[in-house]
Amino acid sequence: MGIVEGLLSGFLQAVSLDVFPYLFVGAVFGLLIGVIPGLSGHFAMAMIIPFLYSMDPAPGIAFLLGAHSTVAQGGGLTAIFFSTPGTGQNAATLLDGPPMRDKGLGAMAAGAALTACFLGATFGAVALALLLPVLQRIVLFFGPPEIFVLALLALTFVAVLGKEDIIRSLIAALAGLLLAMIGLDNVTNTERFTFGWLELHDGLELVPVILGLFAVAEMFELWVKGGSLSGPQTKMLSTRETQKQIFQGIITAFRHWWLILRCSSIGAAMGLIPGLGSAPAAFVAYGHAKQSSKTPEEFGKGNIEGVIGSEAANDAVEGGALASTIAFGVPGSSSMAILLGALFILGVETGPNMLTYHVDVIFVMIFTIIIGNFIGMVGGMFLVNPLSRATGLRASILVPVLLVIVFTGAFAVQRSFFDIGIALLFGVIGYLMKVLGYSRAALLIGFVLGFTVEKNLYLAVQLSGPDFIFNPIPLTLASITVVFLAYNVWTIIRDRGQSKTTRAEQQE
Amino acid sequence: MMGRTRLISRAASICLVSTLALFCMSACQKVDTNKEPKTGVAAFYDGRNIKWIIPYSPGGGYDEYARLISPYLEKYTGARVDIYNMPGAGGLRGNNALFGAAKNGLTIGSINGSAMVTNELAEMRGANYKISEFEFLGRIVSDTRVLVISLDSGYETFEQIWDAGEGVIIGATGLGGSTFVDAVVANEAFDLQLKIVHGFDSSSVLRQAMLRGDIIGSWGSWGSALDAVDEGRHRVVLQSGIERSADLADVPTAFEMAEKTPDPEHTRAILAAWESLHKVGRPVAVPPGTPPERIQFLREAFEKALHDPELIAKAEKSGRVIRYASGEEMTQLVEEAMQMPDNIKQFFISAVKGQL
């Protein structure tokens, strides 16, 4: 089957009456799962798997991927309105989403986020389609040495995130790296920082940590301050004003098409590499957005570019992850591992055979991602109004309700009461960090990447010896890291010099 | 203004209706068609909820088996079966929870047989259970372990790898995990000099490493290697066990190869202990102390469920092998696995602890 033929057939299948209803139900289901903190894409997919046994490939794929593709959109809404990431991927949205809400621009942020998600996903899907012919060779470039250096590069983005206060950011990032060390070291089987607790054997679970750092911490703050999430200074918007903001958000997102394009490329590229995970992609994209922005000082205070960048990368990741799954049957993320199992149940082969004989199925996936995200975008916009109204509730009502949802989410990941404790503990840590001005994002990046860096370094040394760093790709990436870091250190020194002179001038 | 609000509320209701539809669909699957009045134990289970503990995350092999079987367990027990994923500590957390669960016959759990036996033998910290005290409902499948190598590795048979000697790298996941123990056991049994590099994240990362040529291959369960082998991306060169399994008729078994070693006695002794672990496979059990009549009822339901033609058809479609053994047989198999000769036991303990 040729590519064009496959494209047409895939499109016609995706919009046919046999497939579209499943896609629609899946997309709405995914959106709602995404809105609920703690429940993530692979939970939605695992719920759907039992239905697949009796389904044909195309509707089955549309159902499954439809649900999966909208989860990040729903999660973005929760992140913006309740400072609670709906899924782990939305953590980067927390940096600028909630501050926009505080300025009374929540609906605008939501509109922009939903649109950015849709555009990012579309970009990821199109990238997947374009890469099809060369897919196999690209994925094979990335083994432990390359992933190690790439993760290191991602870590250096901490420097951009916390440019204003580099010492505090470094402290936070290193603390994050330390937290990643908790648990059984999978190289030597040594227990590290477990204090003899079996619960800490596998290390800290990501979701309770994120929920604690951001959501619970936010609840503490709200509780201490009183009032409501939307803040006393902003008055409740009417439905019409909310709609106006959503449209403004959409237009703003389209205006930043160049940023979306760049951040989506980051997302798609990082999704392509198995073992890197999707959470860092959004942070790296955020770092890039800040780096390239004309107003980097506004980041973290409610800059819409921060929301757009991270949400675009968020959904573009999936196109990339799908690519490596299709090309080799090597899943790029845990959701993709479930997808792979589902494809097997549906009787669809992956790997070279799929690329040769089932191009139409690949295009069903591509169109499912695009159409599913479109449904998610439109459906999500209808959720904006009720969600933004809920932010106007008094803290004494909202805090208990949200805490129940957040703790349930923390519990649900592993069905573990211990994780509720973790969320609570990190709530305290997150609150203190916020009050004392330490970057929670830097801590999270350190935490997410610490394990990846360590493990891949070990594997790289075992497989290729210590001189693996001199291979072409690692060497290139390592040089980029050094140049990038040096440039940032230089700008920091320069800025400091400037601010000293301005301060001196002011004093005069 | 009014129009828009109506549009919004209409869209909201569409969202609601479609979600409801989804939940209804899931509910429909669970409608019990059996209308006869029930007595005794059947009446106890009718309409109750059975909690099925899976010691691993959603989406893995254990989870998929449970989701495949649970509708049929519901059919033959009349109860609702809730799948309860409790990942952690390599399966220990879920297993401990099952061992200490309420003894009312409403909690059942899947067990990673060989790992839980070796953990207990090695007296691993955190192994708070006695595997022989579990009441087994039966076994879903026994393990066939296979050595999978990549097509571009330059090797085609196990003998060639044997002759290659040092410098050949085999990948494994965690230290002391099953892919690692398999590799250590094979090295010892066949006096191989393969270098074992562990620390790969999962079997999918191992696959990628194979394609890249970082490693020539790895051990794994036949179930997880199946699709990649079917699609002609990898090749199986050796399988565990005495007799060749039906779908691997061209691949020699470890026991066949034992004849070619310098000390076949020693090789066979190790392989026998290894095989006894594989036979434990993936059993389903209830905690000790569960009332005998409920155990009996669950055992019968489990047997019927695993022999349901519909389930068998689905299992075949998804490439999931079913190798049922009864609860009584399981007790026997676990006993056998626990009774290894001392020197072999020591060897397995060091393998699991990663001291080799």
Image (spheres, grey):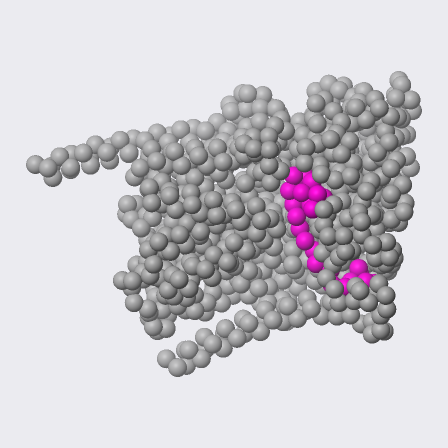
In front here: A213 or A128?
A213
Q: Look at 82% across and 47% down and name the residue there.
A: B135
Q: Look at 86% across and 31% down and name the residue there.
A: B339
Is B75 magenta? The answer is yes
Left or right: B69 in relation to A465 = right
In front here: A347 or A234?
A234
The mark tally for this picture is: 0
Q: Look at 90% across and 47% down and name the residue there.
A: B328
Horizontal and vertical percent for residue A261? 42, 50
Horizontal and vertical percent for residue A165? 31, 37
- Name the residue at the bottom extreme: B2
B99 vs A235: above or below: above
Q: Quadrant of the C terminus of chain A?
A: top left
Horizontal and vertical percent for residue B348? 78, 27
| Residue B88 seen from this side | yes
Q: Quadrant of residue B5?
A: bottom left
B106 vs B143: above or below: below
Horizontal and vertical percent for residue B148? 76, 35
In front here: A392 or A65?
A392
Left or right: B17 in relation to B316 = left
Q: Look at 62% across and 61% down and name the residue there.
A: A62
| Residue A118 seen from this side | no
A124 vs B245: above or below: below
* Span colored in magenta: B72-97
Is A335 magenta? The answer is no
Q: Quadrant of residue B15?
A: bottom right
Q: Quadrant of the N terminus of chain A?
A: bottom right
Left or right: A93 in relation to B143 = left
